[in-house]
Amino acid sequence: MGSSSSWITSLFLFLLSTISWVTSFSIDENFFQCLQNYSQNSIPISHAFYSPQNSSYSAILQSSIQNLRFLSSTTPKPQFIITPFNESHVQAAVICSRQHGFQIRVRSGGHDYEGLSYVSDVPFIIVDMFNLRSVDVNVDNQTAWVQSGATIGEFYYRIAEKSRNLGFPASVCHTVGVGGLFSGGGHGFLTRKYGLASDNIIDARIIDVNGRILNRESMGEDLFWAIRGAGAAGFGIILSWKIKLVPVPDIVTVFNVNKTIEEGASKLVYQWQYIADKLYEDLFIRIFISTDNANRTINAEFQSMYLGGVDKLLQLMEQSFPELGLQQKDCIQMSGIESVIYFSHLPNDEGLEVLLQRNQPKTFYKIKSDYVKEPISEIVLEGIWERFQKVDIPVMTLTPFGGKMKEISEHETPYPHRVGNIYEIQYKVFSRTEDGATEKRINWIKELYSYMTPYVSKSPRAAYVNYRDLDLGTNKNGHTNHSEAEVWGHKYFKSNFERLVQVKTKVDPTNFFTHEQSIPPLSLFEK
Ligand SMILES: Cc1cc2nc3c(=O)[nH]c(=O)nc-3n(C[C@H](O)[C@H](O)[C@H](O)COP(=O)(O)OP(=O)(O)OC[C@H]3O[C@@H](n4cnc5c(N)ncnc54)[C@H](O)[C@@H]3O)c2cc1C
Ligand SMILES: *[C@@H]1O[C@H](CO)[C@@H](O)[C@H](O)[C@H]1NC(C)=O
Ligand SMILES: *[C@@H]1O[C@H](CO)[C@@H](O)[C@H](O)[C@H]1NC(C)=O
Ligand SMILES: *[C@@H]1O[C@H](CO)[C@@H](O)[C@H](O)[C@H]1NC(C)=O
Ligand SMILES: *[C@@H]1O[C@H](CO)[C@@H](O)[C@H](O)[C@H]1NC(C)=O
Ligand SMILES: *[C@@H]1O[C@H](CO)[C@@H](O)[C@H](O)[C@H]1NC(C)=O
Ligand SMILES: *[C@@H]1O[C@H](CO)[C@@H](O)[C@H](O)[C@H]1NC(C)=O
Ligand SMILES: *[C@@H]1O[C@H](CO)[C@@H](O)[C@H](O)[C@H]1NC(C)=O
């Protein structure tokens, strides 16, 4: 009896598994057929379609994942990955995902700090834009069209190919994707002079929830406003941006000056807060604070770029920040494009082509951000240094604003952190290996964040959406807790949040484009 009943059970289980295999297979086939029906292109969509059965599925999935916390066997995986070769492939992905009830996660550079471009708790597909990365630079009119799958390094490279006197104000790190970076802000060494990447966008092509391709004129100014600072993933899929290029002189001067505690780092960081946002806007000095691995000495690295030659820079530094003691030997003159290589710590003897590499070392990390409106005292800084002793690889980057950033109104784009902010802080803790101490590190950064509460922006305590932090609150199960969404919404966007909810309600009322911190439509707020 026992053996025959277990035989029946086995047969039953076998049939069941066959049925579910057939079912999933047929969903597969239908979905794939739908994609074929809706894509028109010389390259068939089969070349852009990966299911877990394809041998390269894992390699494609892992390719641009930056944060190893989201590359484990327990991280939810997409049903399919689509790597469009043509805009019509993206349209097909939107139309067919809606028909088949898949959520879409869109990925450009894969640098999202919380993995939102490639992880979801519900059945989802990834649309990975890396094949759509052409760059078309118009030197005469100082504009460019760039497809969203390009990295910022590739974009800088293509601009430099056409002209060494044109550039773009965006990120420091060359592997960040322009799809995510430009839609959430994007700052770097040119920001004090020219504003954010998103401040320099003049047109865009986006695919809406109905699979239509819209440009600035056809999407209207409300949606065009929203995608320049709020992150675009809640509104549609960005295909390409048209941007205004900015002038860069023949020669820029850079320096990286290290100061340890023994060399007076605390006092210098303190003093920097009084000049960082007030400097002549051609001069940018940020601070990168870390500990030496061996003895945990605090090191403050003053990283700077000046849009001009060394003589003028030395004069300016003597006037505004003599305490740093900058000397000619600390400075290097180079072209604007070479400065990207310098600050990305790339080899400087391999040509500009290193900027085309899409990979960089992956680590396990957690990041949080703050904005500072009043200088922080030396005693409080020393409290940070003490905390830096308690964990292996802590880092803090202080990015100064002022200049152009204070001339742009808080409502001009969704990015509101403008006048009144001296600098932004990025706190980061990371590990190169999985050592079981991730939770300890996350608790450490939360404690540091809590320690900083009295000394940073308040009501709201602001945060940068491109430094995504799910601790600030999330949309859950497709529903939105109004009070929670208002909390993270106001931290990222201040009073622009309400207008963003209106735009979302108009363009995507059923919330097809969604993730844990996408702007919710009004209908989804819990009463
Ligand atoms: C090493 C490193 C260095 C960084 N340096 C800087 C810096 O110097 N300055 C700065 O401002 N920021 C910096 N960042 C933060 C960076 O701006 C954000 O992580 C940004 O969102 C990354 O864009 P991505 O396309 O690479 O990321 P992804 O993970 O691909 O996307 C990020 C978000 O944008 C959405 N998205 C991506 N592409 C599209 C698209 N085509 N259409 C609609 N939505 C899309 C994704 O769904 C996701 O929600 C850095 C990040 C890292 C990891
Ligand atoms: C694809 O198009 C064909 C021909 O128009 C149609 O018969 C079929 O139902 C479509 N399949 C899907 C999955 O859309
Ligand atoms: C992409 O598709 C469009 C039609 O949507 C077509 O005109 C174009 O030639 C295609 N591009 C490539 C590279 O096949
Ligand atoms: C993945 O497998 C499917 C089914 O075998 C095939 O049609 C498709 O071309 C494969 N994808 C790639 C990119 O080779
Ligand atoms: C530059 O812009 C002008 C005005 O919009 C236009 O007429 C001209 O064709 C453009 N030049 C190039 C090279 O695209
Ligand atoms: C400054 O410190 C950094 C570590 O933050 C190190 O990588 C770099 O080599 C140092 N630079 C100089 C000039 O000593
Ligand atoms: C710590 O190590 C760094 C480099 O390894 C060195 O420059 C510094 O002097 C050391 N500090 C102390 C206090 O030993
Ligand atoms: C919404 O979130 C707030 C703050 O986190 C919480 O106090 C409240 O109970 C939540 N409401 C619902 C309906 O979940």
Image: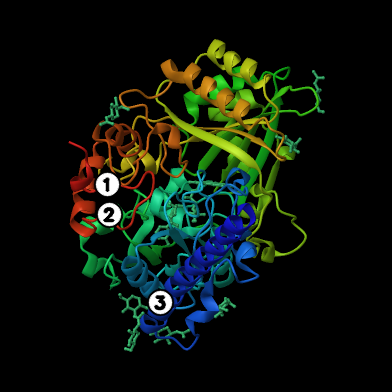
The amino acid marked with disc number 1 is Pro
Residue that mark 3 sits on: 30
Does mark 3's beta carbon lie closer than 8 Å to ligand 2?
yes
Q: Quadrant of ligand 8?
A: top left
Left or right side of 267 for 354: right
Q: Residue furthest top?
A: 379
Q: Which numbered circle lies on residue 206?
A: none
Residue that mark 2 sits on: 511
Residue 160 appears in which quarter of the rendering?
A: bottom right
Here the colouring is rainbow
Within 10 Å of disc 2 (Cα), the crowding (few <14, some 14-19, many 20+) is many
The amino acid marked with disc number 2 is Asn
Question: Residue shown at 36%/72% (left/top)?
Answer: 96
Whether tag 1 and tag 2 are in contact, CB under 8 A, the answer is: yes
Instruction: Using the numbered discs, state the Cα–Cα distance from disc 2 to disc 3 in whole angstroms.
Output: 24 Å
User: Which is in the foreground here, disc 2 or disc 3?
Assistant: 3
Sequence order check, earlier mark of 1 and 2: 2
Instruction: Using the numbered discs, state the Cα–Cα distance from disc 3 to disc 1 in whole angstroms.
Output: 30 Å
**SS assignment at label 1:** loop
Q: Is residue 375 visible?
A: no
The amino acid marked with disc number 3 is Asn
Q: Residue furthest front?
A: 1
Residue 36, compared with residue 166, is above or below; it is: below
Where does residue 504 sit, x and y in percent of width and height? 24, 52
Residue that mark 1 sits on: 520
